[in-house]
Amino acid sequence: MYPFLRLAHQLVRARGLPPLGLRDVHVSQHRCWPWDLDGFMEMNNGRTLTLYDLGRFGAGVRMGLSGVLREKRWGLAVAGTSVRYRKRVTAFQRIEMRTRVVGWDARFVYIVQDMWVAGTCCSQALLRTAVVAGGRAVPTSEVLAAMGEDATPPELPEWVAAWIEAEATRPWPPERPAAA
């Protein structure tokens, strides 16, 4: 089940923090609870992605995106993710998450998020996200204008640009493999 109480907690905390610019870093605090664990007694990879959701919601509040979404009746979608796991997160550990927008193009906003425990990065996610309305992506320039932001895209980090290029070569829809 989605952790709605944790989400509410993060949203309330974010509303009490100063506003952020679009390229600023949002820092949020989380804890790995026993129900976040998998059979190997470490944070489940699905729960990691869910906690990254919570960090993005908090960042959206502080950057002013949440108000624009409510006003325009727009939604959010994740259109692609690449996650690198490097260190286990275990029960009761405190997690510091850092969320930042690294750039955008005509359709997507690219976000990088990291989870840190005791000064060590445990995982990092790169996300391709979109604001959606009526089943279609809202042009990024329209979203940024509604937020009062400059729509000129910054230069993407080389590794993010390479990921976007690699994703463009991936066939869609995928070929359906035959069952054994």
Image (spheres, rainbow, N blue to C red):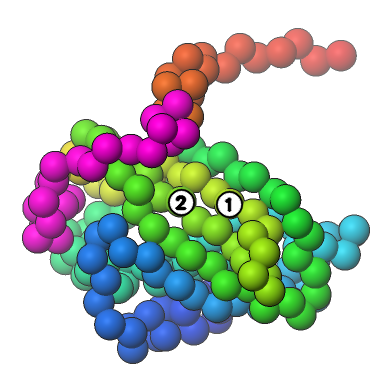
Asked whether residue 87 is drawn in magenta, I would say no
Q: In which quarter of the view is residue 152 placed? A: top left
Q: The magenta stretch spans which residues?
A: 142-162
- Distance between the alpha carbons at the discs numbered 1 and 2: 7 Å
Asked whether residue 157 is drawn in magenta, I would say yes
Q: Is residue 107 visible?
A: yes
Mark 1 packing: few (<14 Cα in 10 Å), some, or many (20+)?
A: many
**Circles 1 and 2: CB distance less than 8 Å?**
yes
Q: Position of residue 143 (x, y in %)?
A: 17, 51
Which comes sooner in the sequence, label 1 or label 2? 2
Is 29 located above or below residue 132 in the figure? below
Q: Position of residue 96 (x, y in %)?
A: 57, 72
As shown in the figure, which amino acid type bears the numbered disc 2? Val
In the image, what residue occupies the spot 25% across and 60% down?
22
Element under label 2? strand
In the image, what residue occupies the spot 75% across and 56% down?
87
17 left or right, relative to 88: left
In the image, what residue occupies the spot 60% across and 63% down?
115
Q: Quadrant of the C terminus?
A: top right
Q: Position of residue 120 (x, y in %)?
A: 67, 64
Is 65 located above or below residue 169 in the figure? below
Q: Nearer the viewer, residue 42 or 6?
A: 42
Q: Is residue 77 visible?
A: no
Q: Position of residue 108 (x, y in %)?
A: 31, 39
Mark 2 packing: few (<14 Cα in 10 Å), some, or many (20+)?
A: many
Is 170 located above or below residue 87 in the figure? above
136 left or right, relative to 178: left
Residue 151 shows which numbered tag?
none
As shown in the figure, which amino acid type bears the numbered disc 1? Gln
User: Which residue is identified by label 1?
Assistant: 124
